[in-house]
Amino acid sequence: MLRKAMKGFGTDEASIINILANRTSDQRQRIILSYKQAYGKDLIKDLRSELSGGFERVVLAMMTPTVVLLVDHLYSATKGLGTNENTLVEILCTRNNREISEINAMYHRKYGRPLQKDLEADTSGHFRRLLVSMTAGARDEMNHNLNLAPQLAQQLYRAGEGRMGTDEVEFNRILASYSFPVLRAVLEEYKKIKGKSLYDAIRSEFSGDIKTGLLAVVMCIENRHQFFAKCLHDAMRGLGTKDDTLIRIIVTRAEIDLGNIKHEYQRVFGRTLESDIRGDTSGDYKRMLLAIVQG
């Protein structure tokens, strides 16, 4: 059917949307293989030659295995003019150890060098240390000892609000090392004993990229779905649309937690994700995004 949708005069975009938006990522990978077997042609090359603009970008993202898509976006974020810190934070600060391990392996396989090396070359200071810590994938995910929370909350206070200046190394160590259940208890304990959230403490005590990174980690600890909802909202706010962010989150979270992200989006911003996509995108690009989001 995809071959039929691309053959002859013009392209039947509606058929492409209907076929691809209603398949899982694994099913789309099998479609690539079946297409090659049936027609002796590369489906990705055919799609590239037939499609254009945002529609082409979202379709190609859908046809790319998730880990490969994330690796490609990490590579793009560290190459070219400047570094896209938000992309690095969004991808690296939200993944568990298994996902980080897969990303590291695929990055090395595809680009011939460790991800850590590119991060070290392209970032600096405490932000670099945070990203390298996240890339290590060494979070102690098996330790759910919530009794650690009071002590860790005090250590974070002494490293931030409780001293002149900030001890970024201590923040990095704690937020990159402990399991999310322990860290959620730490956030609750911090608010209880200090009367303000750790999120607000970081906002007032830190600046620059390390602030962005630490806030992302804390938001993910508290509510990962809300973090992704905020990233989507930021991608559509102001002049222009950050299409890479929009596509990456919608495509990679579609089979994981996009329903929860949609719920948080409406709760936090007072309107639906669908309505903002309609207002911010157009044409077949818009129709494909909506088809994915509406499931």
Image (cartoon, helix red, strand yellow):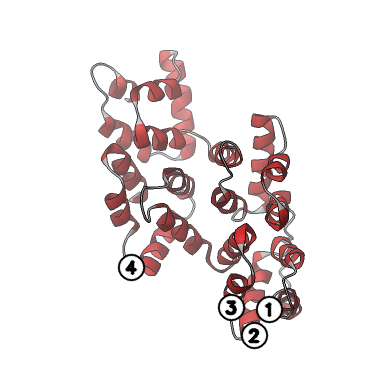
Mark before the other along the chain sequence, 1 or 3: 1
Task: Check contact, mark 1 vs mark 2: CB within 8 A.
Answer: yes
Residue located beneath label 3 in the image: 197
Q: For this view, does 259 lie left or right of residue 92? A: left
Other residues around mark 3 within 10 Å, as few (<14) / some (14–19) / many (≥20): some
Between marks 1 and 4 in the image, the one whose residue lies nearer the viewer: 1
Query: In the rendered structure, which amino acid carries the disc numbered 1?
Result: Glu
Dot 1, crowdedness within 10 Å: few (<14), some or many (≥20)?
some
**Residue in the foreground of this view, choosing between 137 and 153:** 153
Residue farthest to the left? Answer: 9
Question: What residue does disc 1 label?
Answer: 161
Distance from disc 1 to disc 3, alpha carbons, whole Å, reads 11 Å
Identify which amino acid the numbered label 4 is placed on: Gly
The x, y position of residue 13, in whole percent, is 28, 31
Left or right of 155 on screen, residue 13: left
Q: Name the residue under label 4.
A: 270
Find the distance from the CA under tag 3 to the CA under tag 2.
8 Å
Q: In this view, does 115 lie above or below 205?
A: above
Q: Distance between the residues labelled 4 and 2?
A: 31 Å
Gap between marks 1 and 2, in whole Å?
Answer: 10 Å
For marks 1 and 4 on the same chain, the one whose residue lies earlier in the sequence: 1
Q: Where is residue 191 in the image (x, y as percent from the top left)?
A: 61, 82
